[in-house]
Image (spheres, helix red, strand yellow):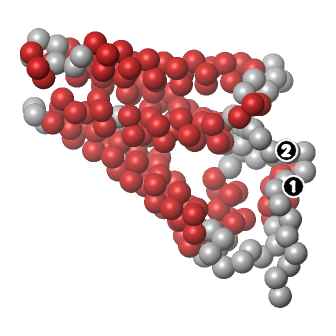
């Protein structure tokens, strides 16, 4: 969880400045570090955008930062004799953030190996922390994790690992296994084109 936290705090530091300058080219080329050169050229030819276009990307960068900080805090919860019980539940925030990242950027394969590895790192970390919490508290009466809590906290990361592996194998075979998660035309620019505002 420490590595995942550090990577996401760094991502916030790299992404918030270009977003705050309303600079989509720098923002997206930093975010999607493995995009094909042909797509990168399209981003570099991107016209100037209206004011406030990148404001939601500032929010995205800040969300990456606080999720990274929470992931780092999970290790402090693990070290505390009382708060340890909640460390497994804290893991779910970075896990959900990474699941959304996986859908958005791993499925179309526009991020490099460091970005793709985060899916497995956060999932394995969530599994191990929840196993540790379960072992520590299983004989503690009301403080013990229920079978449902433990099962869900193990099932969710295993699910993400499983779909991630299927996606990687499909990609290696040239198949778009999860193409149902990409709802836009990817061969050319897509979206709504509006008249230029003067």
Describe the element under mark 2 as helix, strand or loop.
Answer: loop
Which quadrant of the rendered structure holds the N terminus? Answer: top left
Dividing the picture into quadrants, the one containing residue 26 is: bottom right
Left or right relative to 99: residue 94: left
Describe the element under mark 1 as helix, strand or loop.
Answer: loop
For marks 1 and 2, give the CA distance: 7 Å
Left or right relative to 175: residue 151: left
Circle 2 packing at 10 Å, graded few (<14), some (14-19), many (20+), is few
Horizontal and vertical percent for residue 185?
A: 85, 45
Left or right relative to 1: residue 64: right
Relative vertical location of residue 60 with respect to residue 179 in this rendering, above or below: below
Instruction: Residue at 60% x, 36% y: name it.
Output: 102
Question: Considering depth in this image, is 27 or 2 the residue closer to the camera?
Answer: 27
> Which residue matches tag 2?
186
> Which residue matches tag 1?
189
Q: Is residue 126 visible?
A: yes
Q: Is residue 136 visible?
A: no
Horizontal and vertical percent for residue 156?
A: 45, 23
Left or right relative to 31: residue 138: left
Instruction: Residue at 77% x, 41% y: name it.
Output: 183
Dividing the picture into quadrants, the one containing residue 114 is: top right
């Amino acid at each position: 969880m420490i590595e995942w936290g550090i990577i996401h705090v760094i991502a916030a530091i790299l992404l918030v400045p270009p977003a705050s300058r309303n600079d989509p080219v720098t923002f997206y080329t930093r975010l999607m570090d493995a995009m094909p050169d042909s797509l990168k050229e399209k981003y570099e030819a991107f016209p100037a955008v209206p004011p406030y276009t990148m404001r939601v990307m500032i929010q995205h960068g800040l969300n990456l930062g606080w999720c990274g900080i929470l992931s780092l805090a999970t290790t402090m919860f693990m070290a505390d004799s009382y708060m340890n019980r909640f460390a497994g539940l804290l893991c779910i925030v970075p896990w959900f953030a990474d699941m959304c990242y996986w859908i958005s950027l791993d499925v179309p394969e526009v991020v490099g190996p460091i970005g793709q590895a985060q899916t497995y790192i956060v999932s394995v970390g969530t599994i191990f922390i929840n196993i540790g919490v379960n072992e520590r508290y299983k004989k503690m009466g009301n403080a013990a994790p229920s079978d449902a809590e433990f099962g869900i906290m193990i099932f969710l990361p295993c699910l993400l690992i499983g779909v991630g592996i299927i996606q990687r194998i499909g990609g290696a075979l040239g198949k778009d296994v999860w193409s149902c998660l990409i709802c836009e035309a990817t061969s050319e620019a897509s979206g709504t084109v509006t008249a230029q505002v003067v």
